[in-house]
Image (cartoon, helix red, strand yellow):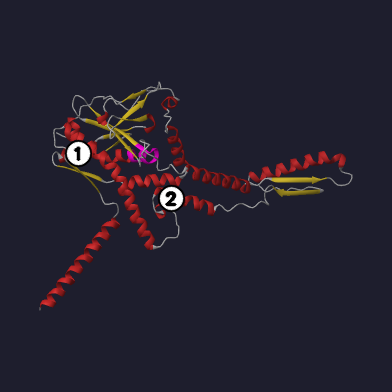
Amino acid sequence: MSWRERKKAKTVAVQLREGAKHPFGELGSYVPQDGGQMGMYRAIREAVPLVDAAVGKLVRLCGGVQVRSAQGQEELSEFLSQVPVGKGQEGIQAFLDCYLDSMLVCGRGVGEMVVDPESGEINALLCADPAKVEVREGEDPLEVKLCLRRSDGKVEELPRQDLLLFTPFQPEADHPYGVSMLRSMPFMTEILLKIYQATGLNWERMGNARFAVVYKPGPGEGPWARERGQEIASAWSQAMHSGREGTVRDFVAVGDVDIKVIGGDNQVLDAQVPVRQIMEQLVAKTGIPPFLLGLSWSSTERMSEQQADMMTSEITALRRYLTPVVRKVCQTWLRLHGFSTAVKVEWEDITLQDMVEEARAELYHEQAETLRAERRKAEES
């Protein structure tokens, strides 16, 4: 009998979800410690495409997990590939993608294993909003308690801590929540957005030019200056309106009329250098080589290889955060089904280039061993 056939179609209560509330219910779930920063981090990701692309690439590059178990291997693999994770997706990899995305942006990942108390099946793996969860230290220094801030402002400790998943990203000694990968970006991002905003306004001003039409009355034209100015303004408005409709209309004026482009004499600042400097700071924080983000900066072949090696180290470090989460999910499933909880989490190779380099190194090693054997044989003879 397959895992889906054994699972009963029954609604199960979820700890980290609340019922419907009014549209401004987020105000009641505000966490004073750092909940307000999460909105800022999400705004940074939305405003800067480079940051959004970096987070997405880190999440995709970390994929590819397999679990080896001493017992129930076939059933466990079926569960990991078909477990619902919400949002119309299924599988442990889809859950890890959402979990890691939240961990990088918000500084911590929070999830839950939804268990049916009657059948003992894990019906779903769900990610929660980290802004609604508070962390309290337990009696044991190694223990933390997850609490949920309800809509009425009360903080309630969740009853089934063994079914919750919590991973802080780069936690500090005095900060159990972890820190976001975007923590040092707000200042640089603000400058970058100011440059882009000013650039857009300058192009709008220069692309859609405004004109200053100055009429200087001559000798004896004073009594009719106002009427003459109104006629010139009306003729100029008609000429500009005809130009917007795609027709050409000449503007003819009598007297001393001066026409200038407003702001045409101003020099537009070169934004390439400051934008490049800010981009370098943002890319350095993400740990991704520039060429993976579509930035054609000067880079030699040797430098690209070193950047790829550094990227491999970054991905390996992120996988170390996710390994305990996968192990806990698998051990919980095995325990519920009466199997041994001995599991081994294995990750796929990050890139094909690493496999080629390893194969080349092994070939060189075998060639060296062959030469040594031939040298020893020649010396003995």
Extreme residue toward the left, this view: 381
Q: Main secondary structure of the magenta part?
A: helix
Across and down, in percent, residue 109 comes to 34, 37
Q: Is residue 113 visible?
A: no
Q: Quadrant of residue 172?
A: top left
Secondary structure, mark 1, is helix
| Type of amino acid at the residue the image marks with label 1 | Glu
The answer for how far apart the CA atoms under marks 2 and 1 are is 39 Å
Mark 1 surroundings within 10 Å by alpha-carbon count, few (fewer than 14), some (14 through 19), many (20 or more) = some
Which label sits in the foreground, 2 or 1?
2
Across and down, in percent, residue 217 comes to 84, 45
Numbered tag placed on residue 283 in the rendering: 2
Q: Which residue is more in the foreground, 266 or 221?
A: 266
| Magenta segment | 98-108
Q: Which residue is more in the foreground, 22 or 274?
A: 274
The residue wearing badge 1 is 78
- The residue depicted at 20 percent of the width and 38 percent of the height is 78
Numbered tag placed on residue 300 in the rendering: none
